[in-house]
Amino acid sequence: MSRTKIVLAGEGGQGVQSVAKILVEAGYEAGKQVLYIPNFGVEQRGGVSIAFCQIADEIIGEPRFAKGDIIIMLSDRAIDRCAAYVDENSTVVYDTSVCTKKPEVKCKEIIGVDANRIANEQLSARVFNIIILGVLLEATHVLKLEDIKNAMEMALGKKFDAKPELRDLNYKALDMGMGLINQSLGV
């Protein structure tokens, strides 16, 4: 059975839960089995927000998992909170422009991306989470780009219709995020 276990973690307000929702919606629409468990404190803005996602080809028998295949860490506190979900088979991605430290975990691979800086300097702070979605898409290859774009249309279509330039901005952010993984790996 092919099952990908994903942990996304960042500060409240970074869009972690939005990324997770788009990701699992894309998986569902692609005919996959999906599971999404949000985890955040009462301080949704300013506290650590974690999303646990699973995407599989067959029924997911267990909603919880001890270790993730890919762990996205978007703040120092997220690094601290999510180290427990990492093992030697995990890929860890962290944002070098937000995190002041590199995750110190034993894993298959650690990838640093500067998504926040790129969002702020080249696009808009509002699409930081979509850059992260692109990073996740390229790092996992669990879904196709078209699946993600369709899910983005379902989640953001009304905003896109009201302001068509937002569609272009978000799609550009998605592409930039996918490119960050290739840059970090030297591809």
Image: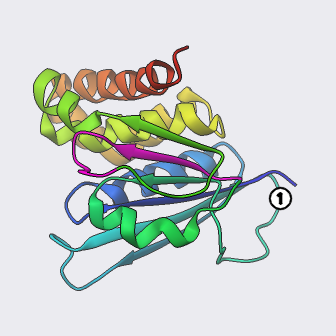
Q: Residue furthest bottom?
A: 42
Give the residue at x 45% y 52%: 72
Residue 44 is left or right of residue 140, and the answer is: left
Task: Please identify the quadrant where the N terminus is shown.
Answer: bottom right
Give the residue at x 26% y 21%: 168
Task: Please identify the quadrant where the C terminus is shown.
Answer: top right
Above or below 25: residue 123: above
Q: In the depicted view, which residue is nearer to us: 103 or 19?
A: 103
Residue 108 is left or right of residue 120, and the answer is: right
Image location of residue 54, percent across then percent down: 63, 60
Q: In the depicted view, which residue is nearer to us: 147 or 130?
A: 130
Give the residue at x 22% y 66%: 12
Q: Secondary structure at mark 1?
A: loop
Image location of residue 35, percent across then percent down: 61, 66
Residue 94 is left or right of residue 2, and the answer is: left
Image location of residue 126, percent across then percent down: 16, 41
Residue 7 is left or right of residue 47, and the answer is: right
Image location of residue 91, percent across then percent down: 59, 47
Which span is picked out in magenta? 89-101
Residue, disc 1? 58
Give the residue at x 61% y 30%: 144
Rendering quarter of residue 39: bottom left
Q: In the depicted view, which residue is nearer to us: 9 or 28?
A: 9
Rendering quarter of residue 121: top left
Dot 1 amino acid type: Glu
Q: Residue furthest top?
A: 187
